[in-house]
């Protein structure tokens, strides 16, 4: 009785469902002789519940009629589209692939270019480390020599270095060993003062030469022969230049002095603008308007140098004045040049390297070569 009521209730419930149903109702649902009666009842009950649960979803989705019919199947067969094989297990077990440990700590092997770059950087770092090791060992060696060297420690070492420098520059020579710089009773006071300056400062290669009084009336070829100079390019002159826009009033600052002694060759034309550029390069923080060079006033020049025009020497002046040497003088062969010697009729020969070292001169391009026509006028 209870089973019959259950079947009738299920049948009534199924027939009351809104059509169409996802699956048709089997005609033998109420047949008591059906061998699959219980299974069919279970399926129908599940369909009923699924249909009730999906009602709201179906109403919310703007799908077609076919989609609404197939929606309950998603709940009936949740593994639809997946692997639904029914065969038995494999006869032989599946062995996992052996995993090799990584050959490098990086997740991917480096590219050849990257590896080469890394190797190059490592080599450079190794070379730098070796250089620093050599420097450190050298410093330690010097410190040990200063501690355990001659008596007096570092002071003795410094004194020894100074003595070596003095010997190298030959400033330790006695005046008696320099016959060319010995006092001459015929020398005027200006020439005698320059001789003493050469002995005291280290210009030991200097040689004073007297010339005829008509020296400046002759051409460069005649002057070369009178001085026995190698070429006319070895004949030079010294002029006193003033920076009228200089912020300083004296000559204490070598890089920004108000006055400069400028030495250049007779075969070149002096250029004051080039002098200004050379000094401006030594003062990068100053503008171009701070440099305006011109020849110093003759009276002021005689006061500062201690000699009159035509006899100016680039050393031994009344007050220390910085010197600028034309770069062409450093290229002379042999490396000597001739300038004024304190008197109009006296000249002196200087060694270029020795003079630049002793006077701490500024070497710069400050002149341009004369044309052939201009050179012919003064040479012949």
Image (cartoon, grey):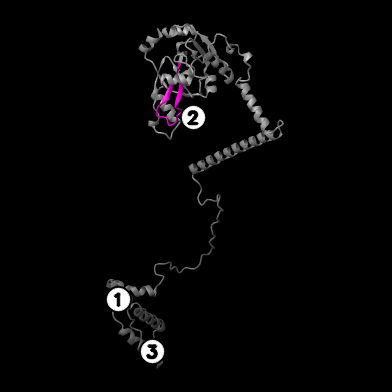
Identity of the residue furthest to the bottom in this view: 1
Q: Could you tell me how far apart the alpha carbons at marks 3 and 2 are, in whole angstroms?
A: 123 Å
According to the picture, the residue beneath numbered tag 3 turns out to be: 6
| Local SS, label 1 | helix
219 inside magenta stretch: no
In this orientation, does residue 23 appear? no
Q: Earlier in the sequence, mark 2 or mark 1?
A: 1
Q: Quadrant of the C terminus?
A: top left
| Local SS, label 3 | helix
Q: Is residue 318 left or right of residue 26?
A: right
Q: Which residues are magenta?
A: 237-261
Q: Residue 264's x, y, as percent?
A: 44, 18
> Do the residues under discs 2 and 1 have CB atoms within 8 angstroms?
no
Q: Is residue 175 left or right of residue 300?
A: right
Q: Residue 357's x, y, as percent?
A: 54, 22
Tell me if mark 2 has few (under 14), some (14-19) or many (20+) residues whose alpha carbon lies within 10 angstroms of its own: few
According to the picture, the residue beneath numbered tag 2 turns out to be: 253
Q: Nearer the viewer, residue 308 or 219?
A: 308
Q: Earlier in the sequence, mark 1 or mark 3?
A: 3
For residue 338, the mark is none
Q: Residue 111's x, y, as percent?
A: 49, 45
According to the picture, the residue beneath numbered tag 1 turns out to be: 59
């Amino acid at each position: 009785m209870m089973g019959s009521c259950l079947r009738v209730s299920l049948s009534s419930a199924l027939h009351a469902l809104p059509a169409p149903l996802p699956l048709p109702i089997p005609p033998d649902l109420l047949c008591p002789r059906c061998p699959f009666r219980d299974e069919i009842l279970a399926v129908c009950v599940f369909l009923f519940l699924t249909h009730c649960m999906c009602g709201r979803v179906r109403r919310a989705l703007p799908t077609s009629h076919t989609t609404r019919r197939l929606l309950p199947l998603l709940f009936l067969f949740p593994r639809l589209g997946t692997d639904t094989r029914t065969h038995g297990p494999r006869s032989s077990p599946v062995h996992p692939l052996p995993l090799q440990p990584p050959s490098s700590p990086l997740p991917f092997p480096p590219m050849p270019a990257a590896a080469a770059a890394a190797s190059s950087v490592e080599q450079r770092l190794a070379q730098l480390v070796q250089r620093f090791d050599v420097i450190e060992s050298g410093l330690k060696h010097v410190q040990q020599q200063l501690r355990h060297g001659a008596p007096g420690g570092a002071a003795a070492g410094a004194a020894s270095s100074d003595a070596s420098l003095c010997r190298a520059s030959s400033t330790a020579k006695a005046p008696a060993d320099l016959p060319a710089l010995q006092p001459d009773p015929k020398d005027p006071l200006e020439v005698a003062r320059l001789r003493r300056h050469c002995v005291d400062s280290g210009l030991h290669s200097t040689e004073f030469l007297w010339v005829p009084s008509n020296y400046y009336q002759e051409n460069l070829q005649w002057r070369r022969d009178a001085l026995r100079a190698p070429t006319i390019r070895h004949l030079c002159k010294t002029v006193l230049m003033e920076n009228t826009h200089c912020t300083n009033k004296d000559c204490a600052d070598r890089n920004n002095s108000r006055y400069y002694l400028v030495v250049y060759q007779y075969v070149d034309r002096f250029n004051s603008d080039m002098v200004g550029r050379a000094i401006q390069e030594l003062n990068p923080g100053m503008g171009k308007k701070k440099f305006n060079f011109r020849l110093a006033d003759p009276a002021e020049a005689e006061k500062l140098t201690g000699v009159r025009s035509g006899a100016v020497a680039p050393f031994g002046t009344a007050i220390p004045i910085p010197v600028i040497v034309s770069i062409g003088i450093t290229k002379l062969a042999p490396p000597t040049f001739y300038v004024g010697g304190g008197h109009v009729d006296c000249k002196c020969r200087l060694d270029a390297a020795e003079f630049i070292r002793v006077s701490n001169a500024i070497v710069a391009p400050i002149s341009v070569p004369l044309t052939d026509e201009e050179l012919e006028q003064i040479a012949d």
